[in-house]
Image (cartoon, grey):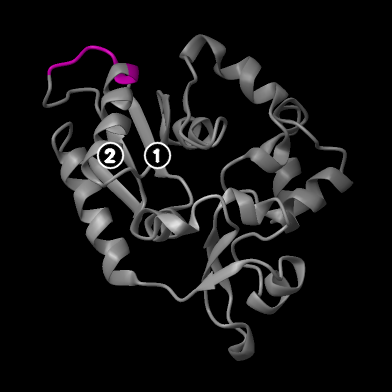
Amino acid sequence: MRKIIHCDCDCFYASVEMRDDPTLRGRPVAVGGRAETRGVIATCNYEARAFGVHSAMSSGRAVKLCPQGIFLKPRFGAYEEASKRMRRIFADYSDAVEPLSLDEAFLDVTPNKRGLLYATRMAREIKARIREETGGLSASAGVSFNKFLAKVASDLRKPDGLSVIRPEDADSFLDALPIGKFYGIGKVTERLLIKEGIRTGGDLRRLSKLQLASLFG
């Protein structure tokens, strides 16, 4: 049985901006392209999300939803520097690290460099070290026996969360999970699935691969 951790920094670009400029804390902050050049929001903090702003939204739309928001151009040098610090931390625990982006990665800690038995303990240590060694950035972590479940788990208790999906709980967890929460299912596919009466993992499980292929290719 594998032990997989998925670690994901919370609101990464916006968090780096708030770390470097404490006056931004508590205010709606979004990072992305300029509205007048048809830019797109790369990420935003939770204060901005309360107004309906989200990543991949046009900057023009975001400004209309949150006119009092602070919209910043990306500073990729600062984000890459923070990412390098996090990756050095990951490398202290495992050589089997699979980065997904600057701010998230999978770690296979089945054998690990620390000789620790429990992946949950490692995830807690990693989260604490990220906060300490990056100047206060927070990360959420998911722990499970495969990448899919670890990825889903890391999103359950954001921000600064830690969730574990054990092998004996996986089937019941997936049966109850809303279909839109499945890693890899986007908004368009979610709408198609719901149209077919597939709202949870339990609904999905009842269909054969042949039936799914006939519906979605």
Q: Tell me if I can see residue 1 in this picture.
A: no
Q: Which residue is mark 2?
A: 130
Looking at the rendering, the stretch of residues picked out in magenta corresponds to 115-120
Q: Tell me if I can see residue 21 in this picture.
A: yes
Residue 89 location (% of width, % of height): 19, 40
Above/below status of 120 relative to 197? above
Locate the C terminus by quadrant: bottom right
Above/below status of 103 relative to 209? below
Other residues around mark 1 within 10 Å, as few (<14) / some (14–19) / many (≥20): many
Q: Any mark on residue 139, and which?
A: 1
Nearest the camera: 201 or 26?
26
In the picture provided, is 52 more to the left or to the right than 43? right
- Whether tag 1 and tag 2 are in contact, CB under 8 A, the answer is yes
Above/below status of 139 relative to 149? below
Residue 100 location (% of width, % of height): 37, 53
Q: Secondary structure at mark 2?
A: helix
Displayed quadrant of residue 101? bottom left
